Amino acid sequence: MSVELAKTWVERMFCSAGARREASQLLNKAAAEGSQATLVAGSDVMANDKACMARWTGSELVVVELSARQQANMALTPTTMFMGLEPRPLVWELPPEPLVTLHDAQFDPGEPHDCRQPLSGICRFTFDASKRMPADSCALQAQYVHPHLPQTTSYSNPKRTFDSLEAELRFSFRPLFSAPRPVILHGTLFIYFQLFTARDWRTNAGAKCVSNVTVAAVELA
């Protein structure tokens, strides 16, 4: 998706001319800088009266409708609009089309999640079996989004080959906080998943995005 298509969504979905202008300027700046952009808008800001969080990843616009509980956790009022820019964790090449399609992610039982424990679960995917990627070159990226958390990214090596049309990818990400530290995050944590390959993960050399982005939310203890 081009940034122009993302701006078309903004023009269609935001009510006021001022909100449309600010959101479009944010997307233009993200595209010019190679950054990611996040827009959080209350229900009165949106043409469909549904609060949402929209995230421009540099190649894709991912939109999540926010429940009443999630809005309360974010202190989001009907007239609020938050905007922000973050650098991309990896400088990556984009293939002509994704090799892997990520679907929904499911977390291991245990909600609400304790941030002092690893975050584990499965992510369903489909894959073109005519292609093959060595498992040791792949890593599943998780970007965490929470109002009180600075930009945080984690990686999990799937330790499997991609040789079936449809399967599940098991992940495990390190804890957000070490055990002795008090947990300071509560509410809803949004996790954006994307699959990458690289020639050398020690330096991120040759990093390539090989999937779409899928998002999931987990309630925190």
Image (cartoon, rainbow, N blue to C red):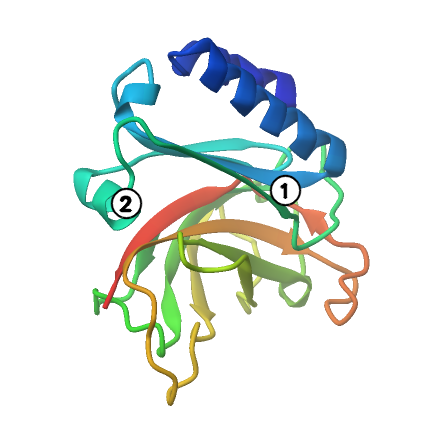
Mark closer to the observer (1, 2): 2
Kindly identify the residue that appears in the image at 72 percent across and 49 percent down. Answer: 208
Q: Quadrant of the N terminus?
A: top right
Element assignment for label 2: loop
Other residues around mark 2 within 10 Å, as few (<14) / some (14–19) / many (≥20): few
Query: Does residue 11 appear left or right of residue 5 in this picture?
Result: left
The disc, 1 or 2, on the residue closer to the chain's N-terminal end is: 2
Is residue 150 shown above or below 102?
below
Of the pair 93 and 114, the residue shown nearer to us: 114
Quarter residue 114 falls in: bottom left
Residue at image coords 49%, 51%:
193
- The amino acid type found where label 2 is placed reads Ala
- Numbered circles on residues, count: 2
- In the picture as drawn, the residue positioned furthest to the bottom comes out as 180
User: Disc number at residue 130?
Assistant: 1
Q: 89 or 183: nearer the eye?
A: 183
Tell me if residue 102 can be seen: no
Q: Is residue 13 left or right of residue 85?
A: left
At 27% across and 68% down in the image, what residue appears?
Answer: 113
x and y percentages locating residue 49 in the rendered image: 25, 19
Give left or right: position of 52 versus 61. left
Q: Quadrant of the C terminus?
A: bottom left
In the rendering, which numbered label is found on residue 75?
2
How crowded pointer 1 is (Cα within 10 Å; few <14, some 14-19, many 20+) is rated as few
Q: Are marks 1 and 2 in contact (CB under 8 Å)?
A: no
Say which amino acid is labelled 1: Ser
* Residue 130, image x, y percentages: 63, 42
Residue 41 x/y as whole percent: 37, 30
| Label 1 – label 2 distance at C-alpha | 47 Å
Q: Which residue is at a point 37% across and 59% down the rendered structure image?
A: 122
